[in-house]
Image (spheres, rainbow, N blue to C red):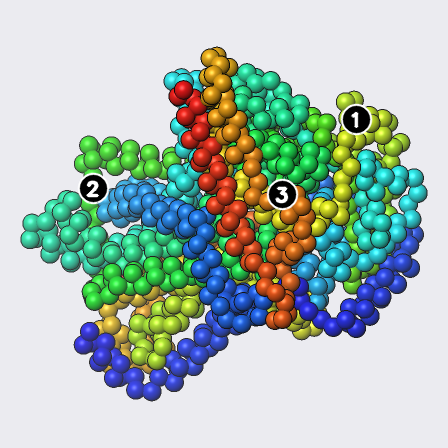
Amino acid sequence: MADVAALRRVARIPWGQATLAITLGLFLFVFLILPIGRVIFVAFQDLRTGGFTLIHFSDFFATALFRESFWNSLYVAAMSVVFASLIAIPLAYFTTRFNFAGAAIIQSLGFIPLVMPPFVGAVAMLLLFGRNGSINLLLGQWFGINIPFMEGLNGVIFVQSIHYFPFILINLSASLNNIDRAMEEAAQNLGARGLRLFRRIVFPLAMPGYIAGASIVFIKILDDLGTPLLLNVTKMLAPQAYLRISSIGITDPMGYVISVLLVGFSLGALWVARLATSGREYATVQRGGGGLQKRDLRPGEKVLCYSIVLLILVVVLSPHIGLLLLSFGTVWSYAVLPDAYTVAHYIEIVRATPQFITNTLLYASFAAFADIVIGVAIAYLVMRSRLFGREWLDYVAMSAIAIPGLVLGIGYLRSFHGLEVPFTGEPLATWWVLLIVALSIRRLPYALRACTAGLHQVSVSLEEAALNLGARRLRTVRRIVVPLMGGAILAGFVTSFATAAVELSTTIMLVASEANAPLSYGIYIYMQSAAGRGAGAALGIVAVLIVTLGTYISHRVIATGRRAEEITSA
Amino acid sequence: MPATHTCAYRLLFGALALGLAASASPATAAQLENKLVIVTSYPKDLFAPFQAAFEKKNPGTKVEVLNKQTSAGIKYLQETASNNQSDLFWASAPDAFEVLKGDGLLAKYRPKAKGIPAKIGAFPTNDPAGFFMGFAASGYGIMYNTRYLAAKKLPVPKEWSDLTKAVYFGHVGMSAPSRSGTTHLTVETILQGEGWAKGWRTIKEMGGNFAQVTERSFGVPDAVNSGEFGIGIVIDFFGFSSKASGFPVGFVYPTVTTLVPANIGIVKNAPHPKAAAAFVEYLLSAEGQELLLDPKIMRLPLRPEIYAKAPAGFPNPFKDPSIGAAVKFDTVLSKKRYNLVNSMFDVIVTFRLNDLRAATKAIEGAEAKLAKKPNAAAAKLVREARDLVAAMPIDEAKANDPQLNAVFTKKRKKVTDVAPPRQAEVERQWDAFAKANYLKARDLAQKAASM
């Protein structure tokens, strides 16, 4: 840590940093703390006197239902992290470690489960894995058995592992790509091989990425609403909060008590993640052409690796396969496959609702861009400055991950509805720009974690060198830090973009007209009627295509960037 | 809490809106505003044809539709009341309109259209005070997947009581009344039709056979359509429109059902009151009523003459008096205990579904055994178990008690008021009661089965 101290001595008066920190703090205060504060306030408010009370928390723990929900949520979150890791680690390792044909495609495909609103994914999953889904109908015909894939907590774990493992995949891949090849070579020279090399050198070096991904998965699952609700599992914390707020009323305190607990747990998980990675040095000085040494697979290994990858991909892409069938199918009822096929649903969406697609691109790219700018700024301030209370920027920004989207939506309506947009006079709360702000707040944690992991791996001594050579700090950040973090920033952008593109819970509270509505809202509307299921699925497929294409292009951009780098440095 | 503002402000704008609404006539498009904002719980299939037809008739007016679940729609109007941008609220459940009316969020309007009957079933078509009006009728009943029933060799259910039979264990689905205004009406219909104690017994005996309690009301027809479960308790048009979309499903009205109007109301301080009034009139016109027969919509029109154009087999409540005649639905009672009934259902059915199913399975198992080998002592235990499942933590008088209901309506009391128990406290007692009873019922039934 001596070099950090040295760097800090170089910058005596951090006025620029202070201004930046205050600006960020103000942004988070106005668009996160204030709206949520107005909502969470209720958790501590005595209904009768309006004064402070903890009675609602004691009500919570005194109620068997809430206690059971509490343990169910923890169990599901923990088990899902385990299963998500089992899916993500082989995919990340094989594609970064070996010369693997189609690595970019596999990485992109492995990512697309995220880009489907959970309620759509669950509809498709039910058609395939449900109690009378295709798989169970076949199993029933052939063997007379029925496997309850989608029943109860197990169903939630199944769907969520498939839905959220990309967080681990994308962060772990970024980390693996950042490992200094020299480390690996040194280990190999000392005789480490195979699994031992992975276990003792590679995986520990990639730990910041894994922890970043796993903590996001844990928190997301704790807070995820769509999946349990679609499987009609209500005995978990997030559904309980949602049901309390949306059906009993937004003044019922129990929903807010649960929100407060969720925020507490998320911060706790982050704290544990921080403990796990603090006190260790992950930064590597050299950028030896990026990442691990790649080697060719032997034929036997090739078969094995490809079968594992293929098996994983078939499972994780099953919601998309189901959705594709649904979007081309006419009627699909109690049958292995749809009765007949048609393109009518695609014609319907192109004719009736093209604005959903353009709105989504606009909102998601603005929100994701804002996220990486803010994410880099916060990561940099937290890790490189010594401003008082800088960690709080991180904690506060991360806490957004634990705010149920619905609560944020209600908070925005409460805080901003009375205000008007200058010139047009519409209410600020339902202005589309505010929707972008809400989306960027919701997705900021993903970008921030990715940026933090990226910065973790950039050695301070490189910045020091630049500063010593006379570069100003801003220039150093722009020319040294950001390029070195490139992969991580891109990972953050893609995660934020993709998930913002399919966000629904906040959107549904804030969208004030169909002309301004994004894709997920369109899918939601279509999916509310028997005749609209196919059209909704078609819209879902369009969403998946957009984001997959975006992801694939970004992978190509990194890859070309890296090749260019290698050529110039050679 | 809805946003607070002064009485004077409310009165001024309320009067303004009323004046404008009253002076509005559905005459020419030139008089209408250039925009109309509708908040609705209806699917795109329903609102889109009306939206297109209205825009075609009034070229200068752009119709914007906000699609929200009924409860979310109410919340949206409450939260945005201080700067209201919505003109119409358009949804099925009359009690949702009662809630909005109670909050003073609707404007009065008397439709000018002639030829609409004053009553549909036992229900007045329009709110007597004039805050909202019916535009179509809906009844509640049982929807089933024909492929599913054939594959599992199940008979088609006809009555609510059929759904309590052991053959349907794990085959039935329903939404929660707290999640869906239409489901609330179904539950309240059963409670009013059969009485509090017997009604809850029916609901819980059906509940024991539930595969799921879905979170959205559309989750039920969706699952029946795809064959996730075979039988669903739904509002009629879900069944009709699914069938019209080609799904292998059917729908029946049980005897204890009620026909209720589906409604529309003009929001108070509507920014486009003339367009709002014109839309209401269009909905009630012969042309608008005929749109209801669109295969994707399939609602019961209010104009009796329209039924001549309906497809064969389409129910006609004006001809067939058996539909919806058995129950005289009391909206005032329904509104009084609205939140209590919702909460009760969630506490004792939705959240305790696994316990309830376990008890029901044990009871049905024991009864199957008894049918083969009668045993008086065991039969008595099974009866006890059934009574334990059916037992309610509170009786009807208590359920209708305004003081208990006050716990569920969220108005903060003055410091000097006597503190009512908190909702969470009341629910905790119900939860403990239900859990213990279901567990004991299961044990009794298992004991009976082993005798």
* Residue B322 marker: 1
Quarter holding residue B193: top right
Chain letter for mark 1? B
Count of numbered badges drawn on the protein: 3
Q: Distance between the residues labelled 1 and 3?
A: 30 Å
> Counting residues from the N terminus, which is met first, the one under dot 1 or under dot 3?
1
Task: Work out which quarter of the rendered image holds the N terminus of chain B and state it.
Answer: bottom right
* Residue B395 marker: 3
Per the image, the residue denoted by label 2 is A296
Q: Residue at x 20, y 74 (%)?
A: A1
Q: Could you tell me residue A209's position as x and y percent?
A: 29, 56
- Check the image and report above or below for B12 versus A470: above
Three-letter residue code for mark 2:
Asp
Horizontal relation, residue A401 to residue A338: left or right = left
Residue closest to the far bottom: A13
Horizontal relation, residue B268 to residue B378: left or right = right
Q: How far apart are marks 3 and 2 (CA)?
A: 75 Å
Mark 3, other Cα within 10 Å: few <14 / some 14–19 / many ≥20 = few
Chain letter for mark 2? A
Residue closest to the far front: B377
Residue B142 appears in the rendering:
yes
Please state which of residues A119 and A319 is positioned toward the viewer in this rendering.
A119
> Which structural element holds mark 3?
loop
Quarter holding residue B118: top right
Three-letter residue code for mark 3:
Asp
Three-letter residue code for mark 1:
Ser
Q: Which residue is drawn at 85% across and 52% down?
A: B130
Mark 2, other Cα within 10 Å: few <14 / some 14–19 / many ≥20 = few
Q: Which residue is drawn at 47% across and 41% down?
A: B435
Task: Work out which quarter of the rendered image holds the C terminus of chain B and state it.
Answer: top left
Q: Could you tell me residue B86's position as x and y percent?
A: 73, 58
